[in-house]
Amino acid sequence: MVLQRFSWPYGGRSATFCGSFTGWRECPMGLVGAVFQVVFDLPPGVYQYRFLVDGVWRCDETKPFVRDEYGLISNEVLVENNVQPVVQPEPSIRGTNMDKGTILKTMPPEPSSQNPSMQIAVIRHVVSGILLHNTIYDVVPLSSKLTVLDTQLPVKQAFKIMHDEGLALVPLWDDRQGTITGMLTASDFVLILRKRNIQVIGNEEPISAWKEAKLQFYGGPDGAAMQRRPLIHVKDSDNLVDVALTIIRNEISSVPIFKCMADSSGVPFLNLATLQGILKFLCSKLQEEAEGCSLLHNQLLSIPIGTWSPHTGRSSSRQLRTLLLSSPLNTCLDILLQDRVSSIPIVDDNGSLRDVYSLSDIMALAKNDVYARIELEQVTVQNALDVQYQVHGRRQCHTCLQTSTLLEVLEGLSIPGVRRLVVIEQSTRFVEGIISLRDVFTFLLG
């Protein structure tokens, strides 16, 4: 065995390493001074390797590299039983599209027989290239209807507007500060109902009063610290990787976009960024790269993504939750809030999908003040869905199969308003799993 050191001396915030001898799985690199490096104990042989620097695949132009039959560029090293590791002589061809430390170009198509680890590495390389080289300004509509509510608006009126407009959340404008200071969401409505704080709505209290009360109810001893926490936001110049990670890491469904430069309107707020909007943009770009990303045509059953029922034999970082129609609505709301998920599949006694109850569905209780005439403890999921049907009619459950391809899943989740797909068994509609927008970006961004 021979100790072989691999290094990346060209800067960056973070770097990982993968090679043919790791199965193309990423390995962390340590920072020694200004150089990222990692050491492996290898048997003699010829190996290929690459670096992932700040989410972008790179090769070291100063070291030997090869281009395989499919056009994939990798550095190459010859490890021999010598005191000093010897590298192969540099190939006669140089990569004309490579500069020291520059980003590799998108790779040509690769065959479906390629090993799964490499397929994943290739699609992550392509996706990171697309998202890093486009900003959130490239994604948001230049002109669109956007509802913003004043913090002095009565809570009752705010929830009525949210219901009438079909909104699960709205930005809040503070006139005194002249900017967006927070968000009002369906979760706020749930918390009011769960705490039986109906007077907050009935007494025409402003949104600002509820936000202060919310800190007292749920902030505990750290309430003051929560109040001082600045609003989570992104800038219109931020790249799409940073925006997506901001949404995922903070476990939120959207994030306000602020302008980098002030304009004549004097309003710093531009729009809201969502994973769905980013995915729609990504899908349009991936169409140009589809032949080079063979993983897009693989079935879900071969891809490590999503939350799965134990009976499928697949592991998940989260537990798959389902509820019966007869389950108390309170139980459903507790799971939605505690697990920080946006919806729960509703099944019959056989585990077959009947509907999906989403956090935003609670807004149906705001119509005609239904919330004031019910005892929440006595309401079942079936009762809540019946109210939803009366207000909006029956709706389609967005589903897919384990045999659906990754591309079909991405396209399904890029449909406006769709935040998750329920994976079902085709003949029985038995719920096997869920693929959410968060799952997709967590997987694609590695």
Image (cartoon, grey):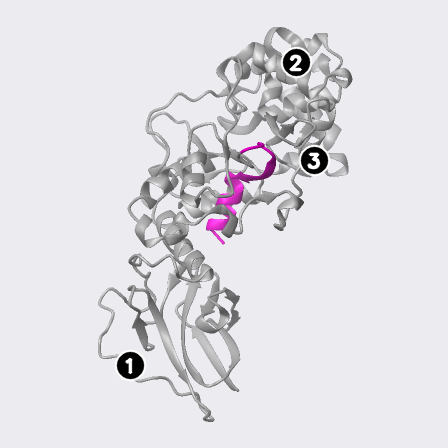
Q: Is residue 312 above or below residue 338?
A: below
Quick check: can you spot residue 274? no
Q: Residue furthest front?
A: 427
Percent from the top left, x then y, of residue 246?
Answer: 51, 43
In this rendering, the label closer to the viewer, 2 or 1: 1
Rendered residue at 57%/41% (across/down) = 250
Q: Residue furthest bottom?
A: 83
**Separation of marks 1 and 3 at Cα, in angstroms:** 57 Å
Amino acid bearing label 1: Glu
Left or right: 356 as drawn, with respect to 109 = right
Secondary element at tag 2 = loop
Could you tell me if the residues under marks 3 and 2 are in contact, i.e. CB atoms within 8 Å? no
Could you tell me if the residues under marks 2 and 1 are in contact, i.e. CB atoms within 8 Å? no
Q: Residues within 10 Å of mark 1 (few under 14, many from 20)?
A: some
Amino acid bearing label 3: Gln
Using the image as rendered, state which of residue 80 and residue 54 is in the foreground.
80
Percent from the top left, x then y, of residue 79?
Answer: 43, 85
Report the residue marked by disc 1.
90
Report the residue marked by disc 3.
338
Report the residue marked by disc 2.
205
Q: Earlier in the sequence, mark 2 or mark 1?
A: 1
Q: Earlier in the sequence, mark 1 or mark 3?
A: 1
**Separation of marks 3 and 2 at Cα, in angstroms:** 27 Å
Q: Residues within 10 Å of mark 3 (few under 14, many from 20)?
A: few
**Separation of marks 2 and 1 at Cα, in angstroms:** 74 Å
Q: Is residue 19 magenta?
A: no
Q: Which label is found at residue 223?
A: none
Magenta segment range?
A: 427-446
Percent from the top left, x then y, of residue 148?
Answer: 48, 21
Q: Earlier in the sequence, mark 3 or mark 2?
A: 2
Could you tell me if the residues under marks 1 and 3 are in contact, i.e. CB atoms within 8 Å? no
